[in-house]
Amino acid sequence: MEKTAKEKFRLGIFVVAGTILIVLAAYLIGNQQHIFGNTFTLHTTFKNVNGLQKGNNVRYAGINIGTVKDIEMINDTAISVAMLIQNKMLPHIKKNALATIGSDGLVGSMIINIVPGQGEASLVKPETMISSYSRVATADMLNTLSVTNENAALLLQDLLRISGSMNSNTGAIGRLLNEPEMAEDLQETLRNLRLASENTAMMMKELGTVIGKYNIEQSVASTVFSDSIAGAKLRLTIDHLENSSVHLHSVATQLDAMVGEIKEGKGAINYLSTDTVLVGHLERTVQNLDQGMYRFNQNMEALQHNFLTRGYFRKLERKKAKSEKSRD
Amino acid sequence: MTLEFTKNIRQFFIEIGELSYFAGRFFREAVKPPFEFKELLRQCYQMGNRSLVLVLVTSFIIGLVLDLQSRPTMEQFGAVSMMPNMVGISIVRELGPVITALVCAGRIASGIGAELGSMRVTEQIDAMEVSGTNPFKYLVVTRVMATTLMLPLLVILGDGLALYGSALVEYFKGAVSFQLYFTTVFDALSYGDLIPATAKSFFFGFAIGLVGCYKGYYCKKGTAGVGVAANTAVVFTSMVLFVIDFVAVFISDIFYDL
Amino acid sequence: MKRETHSIRTNAQEDLEREVIIDIRDLYKSFGKVHVLKGFNMKLYKGENLVVMGKSGSGKSVMIKCLIGLIKPDSGYISVMNNEIKTLNRETLDTLRSDIGFLFQGSALYDSMTVRENLEFPMRRHKKKLGPLTDTTPLVLEALESVGLADAIDLMPAELSGGMKRRVALARTLILQPKIILYDEPTSGLDPITSKEIIELMLRIQAKYGTSSLIITHDVDCARVISDRMILLVDGINYAEGTYEDLITSADPKVEAFFKK
């Protein structure tokens, strides 16, 4: 029973070494737990693996299903990645599945996400090659952001140079913009516009009173007005008119504001250089205004010729003539 | 200096080897009849009873303190509602078994070391041998088996009280009801947490009993020998416990993912 | 190596006449580099009280433990009642041990058990010898009465005095009715009066049960009273043998040193 010190010493070394081996083995197994065969291999290629390492997890729809077995450079644009996947995932992964590289949280290690593909496809078999998709991961996004920033800085420099040359009056654009006469012309145009819009507003008011009178006067026309097809047409016309007038009004206000700004500024250049979009806007507004005026006139004419209102207008004319006569 | 160092290293390995032979003898004797069932039951009662109050009080305080100490950090992250999960998992996986085992190392291993040591010194072990009772079977096997069986029970009781201590803090500081606390804890725990921890407790219990018995059984003559046996039993047991814990963490890592 | 040639011759003559119970020849035992026994020889005859005397650390206790199989000797021949110890397996050794009583130096009562349980303990494994027992109490009481301590049956060892402990221990060795009793320092740690009581008790038991006794002691008074024959253990060998009277008159300085007051 009694053992010599030498035997004890040997056993002691054996036990300590054994313990260390067990720890090592447990560590290795824990790290590559799919080492024991009930796994199959899938392959994919990436252009960039973003720091993926052997042993990183592979996820399918968010579930850990395996680990990265091998990463191999094929050529300068393709890196082949082999993945060990648990066998129980065989009936779930289809051939059109996509492998993407993502990260496990903002600062986490890299992982491969296998995303189910769109539509129908047959199931994968071991050693299948599935396609990959380079999605912008967090790291990528940050990279892109920094590139965008650099571009923006370059753009700003260019703009500065252009505006500098504009101010220095060299070149056609600069001269054009800096002529004070141009500004006056523009101002004049705008003033006219305003006048037109004021007139329109006045006309609208008159039309309103006309229609109000129609309603109050219980004439034959009013009954027709309320239930005949022609009445409906008329109402539509009036609606159009109203819309046009609202439009006109808003244009007028905008113009007002613009003119105010121009007045405050030293010339057209100021206005134009602060906002180039507005120039386009202004152009369109003027066009709209033109159109509005034209349509308004058309509407008014149509109203005059309508058989229902014709009488009113005639009456109006007669009254006018009468009053002129009586004045005379 | 170097000579002393190599001598110490050698002595360390000899001690490990001796303990291994002792463990081997334990297994040989444990499976051979006759079995000392009555003494085993008596020892189980002794081991459980002797350290029950100590384990319960220590665990309760550990649960309380752990919760109080980690609460401010969790508050910083705005994750106070995760407190039961965090405390529950750390207690069940690691702190419960280790704290209980360390308390028992201090209580039981030293007790066994002193008891067997004094029996060795006063020749009671020889007297047993002479009167036809195998002292190894009667003293060592029963004690080691008793600690192996009782420690998991003590760990479970300790875990329970530690969780209760933590729940108490949550109740008063976080207005978390006991029901909510324990529902959250049991939601967070899985068999993958419980089984390795329980398996680990068996090994802890085995180590406590074995080292205590080993130190007492081979106690040097004289009254000083008993003191040395009791003292080194605690030190050696604690060391072995940490080694076992270290190995267990690596091995149970494999199981957590299952 | 100097030996009492005369004694050895006597020894050889006695050998023919009387039955040898214990025979030890050329016993060697060393612990590390300390050689404790260096060729010890001894014979115990049936019915005699043999005292082995020696200084502390001279290897008396080691010799007696080799005898009962607690320590394995390095070499040498030991036989007890014609059974060679080292050839015995555990079971036959236990059977042999049930015929040998051993009174330990410090009494070696089990601290965690009562006196009754202490006495019952040897019976756990030796039921074969005693036959089926339903009630051990009469046997326990009988053994306790023979040492005069029947009242102490339910006390714990911690509640007993040194002398009482020694008596209980003696009762425990008697409970299996052994043929040989080995006494390891029966009077150590006791006051002279208690020592005397214990020695008288030993003699009474000797008379009552007819046992052969091997007594190890360094107490000269004890040796004088109890010994039929004595062996002096010096330097790991049986240095001198003879009756108390033979040895006390010896001119050998090493022998004289034992009896000098």
Image: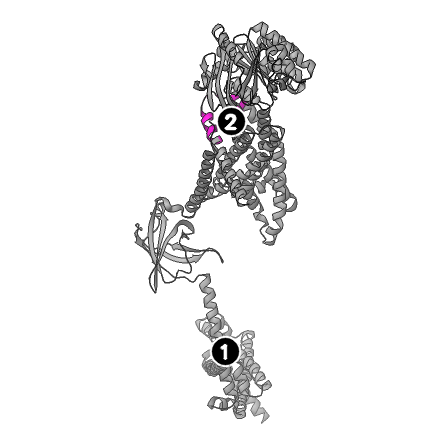
Q: Quadrant of residue B176?
A: top right
In the visual, does A84 lie left or right of B233? left
Residue A174 seen in render: yes
The question of residue B25 being in magenta is answered with yes
Residue occupied by mark 2: C30
Identity, as a three-letter code, of the amino acid under mark 1: Leu
- Crowd tier of the residue under label 2, counting other residues whose Cα lies within 10 Å: few below 14, some 14–19, many 20 or above: some
Q: Chain of mark 2?
A: C
Where is residue C117 drawn, in percent x and y? 59, 16
Identity, as a three-letter code, of the amino acid under mark 2: Ser
Disc 1 secondary structure class = helix
The question of residue B73 being in magenta is answered with no
Q: Nearer the viewer, residue B241 or C220?
A: C220
Residues at marks 1 and 2, CA–CA distance in whole angstroms: 98 Å
Residue occupied by mark 1: A156
Q: Bounds of the magenta span?
A: B22-40
Please report the residue visible at 51 percent of the width from the left and 82 percent of the height from the top.
Answer: A160
Q: Nearer the viewer, mark 1 or mark 2?
A: 2
Please report the residue visible at 63 percent of the width from the left and 36 percent of the height from the top.
Answer: B57
Residue A281 seen in render: no
Asked whether disc 1 touches disc 2, contact meaning CB atoms under 8 Å apart, the reply is no
